[in-house]
Image (spheres, rainbow, N blue to C red):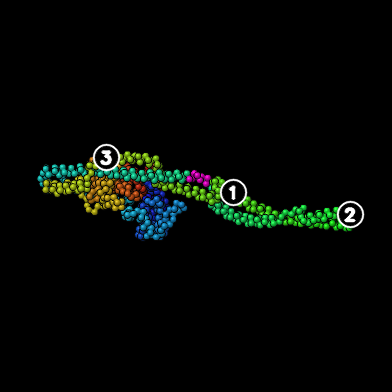
Amino acid sequence: MFLVELVLQGIRGVQELARVRFQGGFNFVAAGNEAGKTTAVDTIIRLLNPVNHRGKMDLLVSRIVPDASRGALVVFSDDSAYYRVIQDFSKRAVNLSKYNPGTKEFTLMHKDWDATSQFMAGLMPGISEEDYGRLFVFRRESCSGQATYDLPAYPAAASPAAKGRPAPPAGRSSGHEARLAELRETMRKAEEAADAEYKLDAAKIRLGEIAKKLESTTDAWRRREELAAEIENLKACEMLPENLPDLISDHEREQGEKMVKTEELAQDIEALTMQRDAIPPANLVMDKLFLSGVAIGGLALLSGLFPLDGSEIYFPIGVLAALLLIAAGWYNSSRKNSQRTEVQKEIDSLVKERAEIEKKFQDSGAAIMKFMKATDSKSVSELKEKADNYRYFQSMYHDLKEQQQLMTGGVNVDDLKAELAKQQEVVAVLDKAAKALAHNAVDTYSVRQEIERVEAEHAQAAPELGFSGMDERGEIMPKQPAGAGVNVLAEIAVASRVSGIEMETLVPAVESAAQRNLQTVSAGKYVRVEVGPDGLPIVHDKNGAKLAYGTLSHGTREMVCFCLHAGLVEAIAGKRRIPFILDDPFTGMDPARQHAACQLLRVLGTKTQVILFTSNPALKAANDVVLELK
């Protein structure tokens, strides 16, 4: 899980709208004094752990605009989904939404406190608000306010009675020293073996992470190539306008209206055609009346050519009758042809009207037809499907690209392959070194307890032999009062519970990581740090001196505390990748150590998300993506 975006408005110290967008690795957030760094950290904790508690929310309500104090946080969960939680601290309201890649909007999931709290707790199972604050939030005061330790008296200040006691027998002292030397050598070798084993385990975890990251990146690249190929096939859809759905809707509506009208016209044309066909074309020479008139006229002519009795009467009557019959035949055929012509004119008019409707539809749908031709679509539905697919593939491509950039931090496949090969070589070297030291592996806790037992026996015997007892040990191990503020073992116990890593494995892992951090930040002045049985750190300098936590300067204590905390986060990063948030923690260090500590966080950012809020812009590096909180 990592944080994506934080939005603040009207919250304590932040009056105007402020938006900070994070990336998956190291985040450098620059902000001046009183710019809202602590407010931002407190808001993140409150948004990650929503609870309807007036006291906790009132701390974030602005005194200037108490009615408009709200914050929002977008997180990318382990199930590869984006969630946004919004809290109105003044109105004590909350809602939780999930991002929908299809619509590119957040869909509301919950609006009640119980459901939202339960869901957010599921994003970090087993980690309470207190656990998160102890393990994954590092503030300026995390190492301050600790009890100072009273230094013991020097041996010269021992009582006269102690000075007057006889010296210890040489045999007993040398026996203790030999036993202690043997145990310390065994302890040193065992710690070397444990360090080698831990380095191997850490390298293997890192190798697995790189392999998993490479696999997911390769899959993402392959999916991107597939989407790019789909987009290339639909490249013609690039010229389609944004309002294409509206154009298609209008086109389909006009097409429906055209189909209704043309269907009505087709029915009318069909009816008129049947009516026209029912009127056969009339032929004058085939008309019965015309033929009768011709026949009678012929007989009348014959009667005129061959005079007979009464022919002078039949001839004119026959001619007149013939003319009447011929005229009647002509009228009959002309009337039928006229009716047929009128029906045909109506048919032609309807056909012309249908053609005009088709032409008007084609003119209005010219743009759609152009788009169909450009995209090689056979129908409007096919055009619409191609346009939808083009937009869908483009949206998926951009979302996948953005998600890949967030997850990989801009690292490409070739760089990951090179890093994987390099890490494989590192694993091989560490495996060889671990095997070479495996015979020295023993239970370091048992050896440490044995050393303490022998030292305790020596201390108890010392007064009888003339030593000042605890004062003698005081030069190396100052007495530390009970109830001291720092307890690294307690922090490791919490980390063990939330990560599922056994204490026997986690304590050496934290010590080894903290040792590397301490050597880096102190520029080699301090070479080792271990956790004492009372939970307090014990630091070894490069000269071999063992320094108790209480004897260190304030700035050095802050440095040691930071190195241990960063080592703890690193040790459990393989099991729980939870955002590590720091609230301007380097104010007590000198500039050189501040730069070294910041570089250490950049390395830690390759394993988990790190968000550094700082008021020192000089700590930024050339490759840092600098975010600002104004």
Q: Residues within 10 Å of mark 2 (few under 14, many from 20)?
A: few
| SS at badge 2 | loop
* In the image, residue 234 lies in the stretch drawn in magenta: yes
First-in-chain label (1 vs 3): 1
Which residue lies under the disc numbered 3? 433
Whether residues under marks 1 and 2 lie with C-beta atoms below 8 angstroms apart, the answer is no
Q: Is residue 250 above or below residue 526?
A: below
Query: Splitting the image into 4 quarters, where does residue 221 fall?
Result: top left
Residue 487 location, x and y as percent? 26, 51
Q: Residues within 10 Å of mark 3 (few under 14, many from 20)?
A: some
Q: In this figure, which residue is indicated by the disc labeled 1?
A: 366
Residue 527 falls left or right of residue 626: left
Is residue 298 visible in the rendered image? The answer is yes
Q: Verify whether residue 535 appears in magenta.
A: no
Asked if residue 557 can be seen in this view, the reply is: no
Q: Residues within 10 Å of mark 1 (few under 14, many from 20)?
A: few
